């Protein structure tokens, strides 16, 4: 505590002691308290707001977490809003961390119940939608306090739009932009307490640093993930209505809703924009006084903030620029981010599907419909669809080609299947057979056509570049094929494509012009547009709003995509054969093969036909599951695109997956050039995917080859220097001995001469020309003494000899004699083989 703080506290305590002489006796106990915060809470009307904030900051350093939360609950209960509003920004930042990511706050993204049960339960109780923190929000909301939020921390497209004086298309930002006095930098949003709290809560997922991979934290068990689920369940209820605020002012006034704006044809990015300054002024007095808006304004605010902060990182203009291979990524979502978005989408489907059957159709809209029911119908198409599409497009095009893409895949598949979250789903889940997708979902499929078709093509392009032998990649292909193979879904997608591809001659010209500016993001309380019953118009409006008027649509059931599907079917077939071959190799190997190979008692095939794969680590069960997933995925693709068995057989043969007579895989697909074999695009894919490879062998000086894992590096280097010295000293004598034509010459040639380089299998003509100029004379090689196998063999030999009472020297002589006999026999066999060749 600083000197100034100490003096201030002493002065205030002295004041309280003097006051205790004339106040009731029970104040004296509080006056002599050692805690400045307790003294502050005893006389809230006598304290300065800055003193309360300073006390809380000091306690945040000196007191444990549980005690700090307990004190905060007391402060929220005892202090009026006039003093609480000064601590609110600091408290929000201390919980969720700073917007620049430097302060982590309570670190809710790492807080787990099984690791820190006490802190977890306290934090969850404090931040619960019915807890003390939300009570503070409502307490400030009732007094209409406002807080500044810097525009610089908003998502890229929103920040750029506001800085260019263009109003973003979301009504969330209307009436909230505050211009600096000089008109320069420092733009802020003026937010009410609820908006300020939810802005910080949502952005803490984005602004904080990604979690280290070494922590192995399961996102669904973290406090942040569970809080998101609780807020969604509270403010977007699937049953009943939104609970009312827990606080009301003494006068009985309830928290006022955020200002509402009337319907406006908000322009999309890339089109003509109205000046932000003009819109800002024109909206200052536009407040919807409809009392019904009090029911769900918090629900709409929560959804809009989540969508804006988590999904609105790519505009249509930015998405089109990102198609360029030279474009730089502006924002890269993490796997944790994607999992939270998936939770949002699943709850939104359940929220929208909780409408009663007689309320679900827009044609039944009437003034008697409650705002919550209106909101359920409008939540996904008006607030989520466009931003989610651009978000998914970016993920499909820029996510690494690894197993972490599973999170993006499951988020996409969750959005494509709203029927999984319908109320009747529980009654149908007992049926093991896939149920037919009801025709009532046809409007959803048609109004989300690009989500099904264009993203499916994006997945095909990813799958064609991945190793399908990997169990995780095979599972992803199986998941997508299984979802799209649900009965009646492919037919509904094809029907939607037919509606989009219909000629536009039958549509009035006035309707055609509406394609360019669909009003899908306005407030749900705005007057509804006229109900459009023409399905063709709906599909075209959807496609043009997401891709632009000049988009080139590639039909999912057209010839181009069918060609991609056939290529994928080929690769699935080849991956199945590769997985089977790896399984056969593993099955033929004895249980201790790897250990014996390390000791060099068995041959180590360094030129194996298959590179290392996660199949080798997962075992036979993983191989079986991979084969099963690939087999089912192939069957689903044939079902979706009506591929015949004859087509698959023909394509498999054309791909060249047959084996040669020895059972080994053929070389990668190549063509013969002047300098040897040249890989084709298919051959490059086969190598990258691990489906085929060249037989690579070391062709250089055997003495200079890299030190292997089964050799002792220092001993190999020492033996090399020793053998080099011997070869230099006795080079003439070794040449003379190897030149003799008798048995002694053959014996020396067997030990001192390498096999002819011409007998080696050289694939490259360049390698042959280099090998032709390399002539090496006789030399001694002692490198074999540097391997673990040789040393362990010698130790075992001495150990066995000691059991028979044979000393080290006799054992050494016996080993030398055995080796000489073995070498003589090998010399005779080698010379006899050469005579047969002549």
Image (spheres, rainbow, N blue to C red):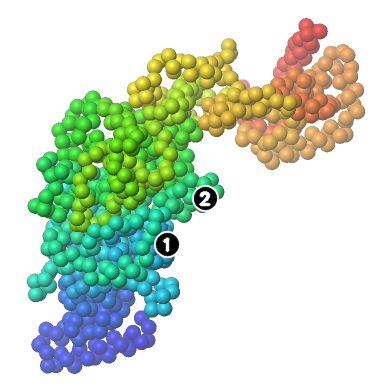
Q: Name the residue under label 1.
A: 160
Q: Which image quadrant is residue 235 in?
A: bottom left
Give the camera-side residue of 634 and 609: 634
Secondary structure of the residue carrying numbered label 1: helix
Image disc number at residue 711: none
Give the vertical position of 261 relative to 608 (above or below): below
Q: How many labels does the image show?
A: 2
Q: Is residue 46 above or below residue 325?
A: below
Q: Which type of secondary structure does the marked residue at label 2 adopt?
A: loop
Earlier sequence position, callout 1 versus callout 2: 1
The structure residue drawn at horizontal position 31% and vertical position 79%, both measured from the top left corner, is 54
Q: Where is residue 56 in the image (x, y as percent from the top left)?
A: 28, 75
Quarter occupied by the C terminus = top right
Q: Is residue 753 visible?
A: yes
Residue sitting at x 35%, y 60% = 168
Residue 122 in view in this figure = no
Picture coordinates of residue 485 (x, y %)?
A: 31, 27
Q: Residue at x 42, y 62 (%)?
A: 160
Q: Nearer the viewer, residue 113 or 189?
A: 189
Give 40 or 328, whichever is nearer the viewer: 328
Question: Measuring 21% from the left and 40% from the top, which residue is drawn there?
Answer: 533
Q: Nearer the viewer, residue 87 or 506?
A: 506
Quadrant in which residue 68 is drawn = bottom left
């Amino acid at each position: 505590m600083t000197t100034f703080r100490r003096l201030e506290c002493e002065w205030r305590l002295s004041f309280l002691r003097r006051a205790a002489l004339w106040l009731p006796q029970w104040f004296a106990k509080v006056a002599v308290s050692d805690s400045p915060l307790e003294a502050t809470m005893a006389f809230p009307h006598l304290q300065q707001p800055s003193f309360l904030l300073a006390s809380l900051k000091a306690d945040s350093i000196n007191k444990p977490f549980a005690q700090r939360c307990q004190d905060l609950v007391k402060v929220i209960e005892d202090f009026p809003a006039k003093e609480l509003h000064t601590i609110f920004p600091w408290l929000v930042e201390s919980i969720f961390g700073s917007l620049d990511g430097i302060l982590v706050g309570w670190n809710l993204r790492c807080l787990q119940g099984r690791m820190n049960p006490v802190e977890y339960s306290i934090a969850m109780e404090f931040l619960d939608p019915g807890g003390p923190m939300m009570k503070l929000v409502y307490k400030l909301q009732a007094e209409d306090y406002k807080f500044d939020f810097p525009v610089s921390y908003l998502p890229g497209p929103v920040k750029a739009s506001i800085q260019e004086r263009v109003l973003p298309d979301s009504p969330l930002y209307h009436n909230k932009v505050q211009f600096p006095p000089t008109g320069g930098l420092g733009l802020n949003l003026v937010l009410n307490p609820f908006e300020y709290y939810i802005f910080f809560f949502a952005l803490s997922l984005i602004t904080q640093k990604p979690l280290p991979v070494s922590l192995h934290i399961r996102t669904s068990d973290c406090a942040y993930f569970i809080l998101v689920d609780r807020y969604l369940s509270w403010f977007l209820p699937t049953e009943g209505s939104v609970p009312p605020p827990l606080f009301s002012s003494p006068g009985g006034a309830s928290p006022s809703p955020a200002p509402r704006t009337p319907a406006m044809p908000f322009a999309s990015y890339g089109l003509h924009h109205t000046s932000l300054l003009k819109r800002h002024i024109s909206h200052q007095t536009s407040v919807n006084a409809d009392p019904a808006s009090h029911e769900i304004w918090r629900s709409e605010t929560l959804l809009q903030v989540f969508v804006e902060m988590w999904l609105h990182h790519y505009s249509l203009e930015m998405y089109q620029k990102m198609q360029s291979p030279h474009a730089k990524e502006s924002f890269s979502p993490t796997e944790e981010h994607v999992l939270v978005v998936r939770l949002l989408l699943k709850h939104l489907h359940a929220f929208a599907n909780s409408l009663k059957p007689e309320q679900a159709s827009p044609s039944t809209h009437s003034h008697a419909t409650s705002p919550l029911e209106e909101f359920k119908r409008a939540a996904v198409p008006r607030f989520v669809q466009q931003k989610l599409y651009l978000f998914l497009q970016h993920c499909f095009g820029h996510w690494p080609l690894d197993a972490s893409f599973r999170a993006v895949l499951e988020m996409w598949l969750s959005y494509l299947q709203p029927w999984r979250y319908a109320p009747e789903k529980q009654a149908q889940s007992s049926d093991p057979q896939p149920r037919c997708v009801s025709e009532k979902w046809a409007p959803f499929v048609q109004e989300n056509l690009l989500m099904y078709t264009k993203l499916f093509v994006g997945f095909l392009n990813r799958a064609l570049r991945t190793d399908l032998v990997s169990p995780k990649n095979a599972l992803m292909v199986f998941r997508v094929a299984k979802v799209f193979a649900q009965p009646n879904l492919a037919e509904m997608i094809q029907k939607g494509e037919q509606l989009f591809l219909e000629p536009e001659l039958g549509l009035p010209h006035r309707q055609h012009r509406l394609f360019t500016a669909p009003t899908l993001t306005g407030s749900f309380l705005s007057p509804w547009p006229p109900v459009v019953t023409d399905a063709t118009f709906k599909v075209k409006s959807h496609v043009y709003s997401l891709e632009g008027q000049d988009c080139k649509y590639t039909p999912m059931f057209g010839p181009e995509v069918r060609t991609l599907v056939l290529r994928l079917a080929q690769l699935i077939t080849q991956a199945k054969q590769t997985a089977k071959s790896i399984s056969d190799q593993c099955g033929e190997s004895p249980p201790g093969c790897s250990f014996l190979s390390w000791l060099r008692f068995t041959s180590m095939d360094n030129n194996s036909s298959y590179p290392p794969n996660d199949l080798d680590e997962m075992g036979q069960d993983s191989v079986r599951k991979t084969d099963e997933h690939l087999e089912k995925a192939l069957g689903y693709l044939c079902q979706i695109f009506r591929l015949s068995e004859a087509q698959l057989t023909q394509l498999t043969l054309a791909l060249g997956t047959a084996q040669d007579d020895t059972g080994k895989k053929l070389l990668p697909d190549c063509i013969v050039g002047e300098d040897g074999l040249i890989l084709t695009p298919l051959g490059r894919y086969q190598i990258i995917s691990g489906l085929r490879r060249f037989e690579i062998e070391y062709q250089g000086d055997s003495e200079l080859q890299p030190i292997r894992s089964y050799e002792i590096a220092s001993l190999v280097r020492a033996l090399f220097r020793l053998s080099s010295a011997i070869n230099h000293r006795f080079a003439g004598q070794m040449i003379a001995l190897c030149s003799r034509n008798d048995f002694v010459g053959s014996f020396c040639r067997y030990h001192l001469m390498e096999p002819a380089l011409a007998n080696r299998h050289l694939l490259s003509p360049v390698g042959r020309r280099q090998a032709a100029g390399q002539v090496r004379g006789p030399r001694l090689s002692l490198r074999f003494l540097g391997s673990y196998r040789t040393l362990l063999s010698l130790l075992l030999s001495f150990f066995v000899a000691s059991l028979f009472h044979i000393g080290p020297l006799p054992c050494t002589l016996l080993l030398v004699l055995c080796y000489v006999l073995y070498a003589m026999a090998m010399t005779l066999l080698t010379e006899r083989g050469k005579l047969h060749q002549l």
